[in-house]
Amino acid sequence: MSDASSLPSSGAARPEPVAGFPAAGNLSDAEREDLRRHGILLTSLEELYNWGRSNSIWPLQFGLACCAIEMIAAATARFDIARFGAEIFRPSPRQADLMIVSGTVTKKMAPLVVRLWNQMPEPKYCIAMGACAISGGPFKQGYNVLKGIDRFIPVDIYIPGCPPRPEALLHGLTQLQEKIKAERLAGPDTARHLRPENPGEFPIPDYGAHDLQPPNNPALFSPPSLPRKP
């Protein structure tokens, strides 16, 4: 056993890296993938954290209209949403982290959808499934239909269609997984739920005499201005 005098001092220079084994931060994606094929995984706490969250999404168990039938079909054996770790539909918003707005959002239902969103803990995400949830769909001109749920809550993924098939929902789910994996835990690109200035709850609209009050959340949505000729 060597004595303490033979050990390098704290101020000694660090040894040079062995040839052929660069530092983990200097590896290219191709080199990392080659190591994965040999059973060697190099990762970071951020990547491991986001990987776990992206593969354990718990959707809220509720539906609004015909798009909900397609959402239910996505959980059947033929499409098997369990392959993506999102088969646990929770009946309570306090146990869910994904809201799939599947169907027509009437103005009578909109305050309840916002209330459910506020009861979901952070981090939480929203998928607008179908033309009705995105913009009102074929019922857009109806006085009782909300022209998109993004007027009151933030939407992460839009899935067009009337109604979109279960494969479209699975594609939207994989896109959400990629978004979660790319989130940052610190720095200027910090994820939305980690920023103290971003609220986790949003105002619930009231039923007015002729419309919801307010008709939208100004912090999330502003109607487009149409150019008019003088």
Image: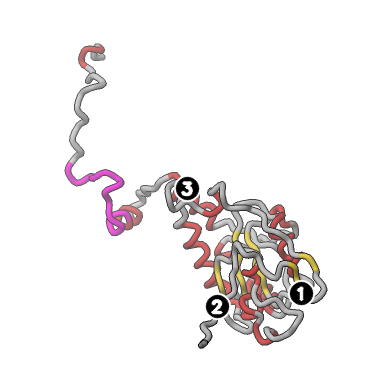
Residue ranking furthest to the right: 209
Residues 118 and 173: in front is 118
For marks 3 and 2, the one nearer the N-term is 3
Q: Residue at x 54, y 48 (%)?
A: 194
Mark 2 = which residue?
Answer: 225
For badge 1, the amino acid type reads: Asp
| Disc nearest the viewer among 3 and 1 | 1
Closer to viewer: mark 3 or mark 2 = 2
What is the secondary structure assignment of the residue under circle 2? loop
Q: Is residue 131 above or below residue 1?
A: below
Which residue is tagged 3? 185
Q: Are marks 3 and 1 in contact (CB under 8 Å)?
A: no
The spot of residue 207 in percent (x, y) is: 80, 69
Amino acid tagged 2? Ser
Seen from the viewer's position, the closer of residues 106 and 37 is: 106
Q: Residue at x 26, y 14 (%)?
A: 1
Q: Which residue is mark 1?
A: 211
Q: Earlier in the sequence, mark 2 or mark 1?
A: 1
Q: Which residues are magenta?
A: 19-32
The answer to which image quadrant residue 141 occupies is bottom right
Determine whether label 3 and label 2 are within 8 Å by CB. Answer: no
- Look at the numbered disc 3 and give the secondary structure of its residue: loop
On the image, the x and y values in percent for residue 56 come to: 58, 56
Residue 13 among magenta residues: no
